[in-house]
Amino acid sequence: MNFWKNFKKKMKYEDFIYNLTKTILLDLDIKNLFVNVTEQIREFLDAERCSLFFYDREKEHLRSVVISADKNISKVEIPVDKRSIAGYTALTKKILNIKNVYDREELKSIDPDLKYPDPWLSIEGKKIRSMLSVPIMGDGKVLGVFQAMNKIPFFTEEDEKIIEKIVPLIGIALNNVIKYSNMKIAQNIEKTILENISEAVVLLDSKNRILTYNSQFGEMTGYRFSKMNIENKKIDEILPLIKAHMDKIDFVRKHNIPQEITLDLIRIRIIPIKWKCVIKDDFDYVALIFHFPRG
């Protein structure tokens, strides 16, 4: 009797892994991919709902990819810290199996600073109780967090073992999407720059830090900085004279309208670069294009 029970259980698991892998490899629609993957895992774990978050490393927060909680909730952002279960999972890279998220003693036994509830999870008539929160890893780095909620009576150690085997598959899906998104972003940036370029170019992130630059920019600065010393530094640290014009850079980013500034004889064109992304915030980069007088 136990043999057949275990055999059926094994077959069910193998069918689940096969279907999940097929979804990850064959579903070309990014939004549908994560919805389908999350739903398949929810059904297999017999959970009431599941959620999937992507870790935005630049802004240091988790951003919802799938929220199977309420159709009115479109996007959720959670800081990566101990003030939430999802944030704590990303911070510590640990699996959390919580029987009652409202039991303060249970949370304190994990970490005295761990907090709950997350207000966005509160839905009238539906209360979160048990939760399985799992970090999604790739190349030793946190890519996101997967959460399953409300299994009766609660999630088991066997569920932990199952989810531990499943999350690498989600990690593959996230990694593929990140690579695809980065490729599309690079293509968009290249297209935008090539349409405007004539001289030195530097690309700034949302915090006005230097992401990348071309060789002409290095030449313009007299090669005083190595690549390591320039990248991730704020532009006004490398070019102090531009500090008086930072408001214009912020204006371009906010209003998506190109602007020009002048530093001595150098004319600088400020170009907004926008890209909509499923797994991250919309990219609001800015390119600075330096025009020198000819002759």
Image (cartoon, rainbow, N blue to C red):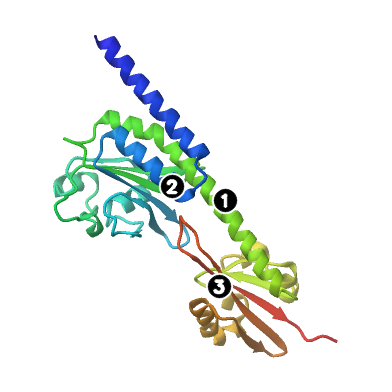
Of 115 and 162, nearer the camera is 162
**In the shown orientation, is residue 53 left or right of residue 290?**
left
| Label ID, residue 32 | 2
Amino acid found under the numbered disc labelled 1: Tyr
Q: Quadrant of the N terminus?
A: top left
* Marks 3 and 2, the one that precedes in the sequence: 2
* Residue placed furthest toward the right: 295
Amino acid found under the numbered disc labelled 3: Lys
Q: CA distance from mark 3 to mark 2?
A: 38 Å
Name the residue that disc number 3 marks: 234
Label total for image: 3
Q: Secondary structure at mark 2?
A: helix
Q: Secondary structure at mark 1?
A: helix
* Marks 3 and 1, the one that precedes in the sequence: 1
Spot occupied by residue 56 in the image (x, y as percentages of width and height):
44, 57
Q: CA distance from mark 3 to mark 1?
A: 27 Å
Picture quarter containing residue 241? bottom right
Name the residue that disc number 1 marks: 180
Question: In the rendered image of this protein, does residue 270 appear above or below residue 60?
Answer: below
Amino acid found under the numbered disc labelled 2: Asn
Camera-side mark, 2 or 1: 2
* Marks 2 and 1, the one that precedes in the sequence: 2
Q: CA distance from mark 2 to mark 1?
A: 16 Å
Camera-side mark, 3 or 1: 1
Q: Secondary structure at mark 3?
A: loop
Question: In the rendered image of this protein, does residue 233 appear above or below residue 90?
Answer: below
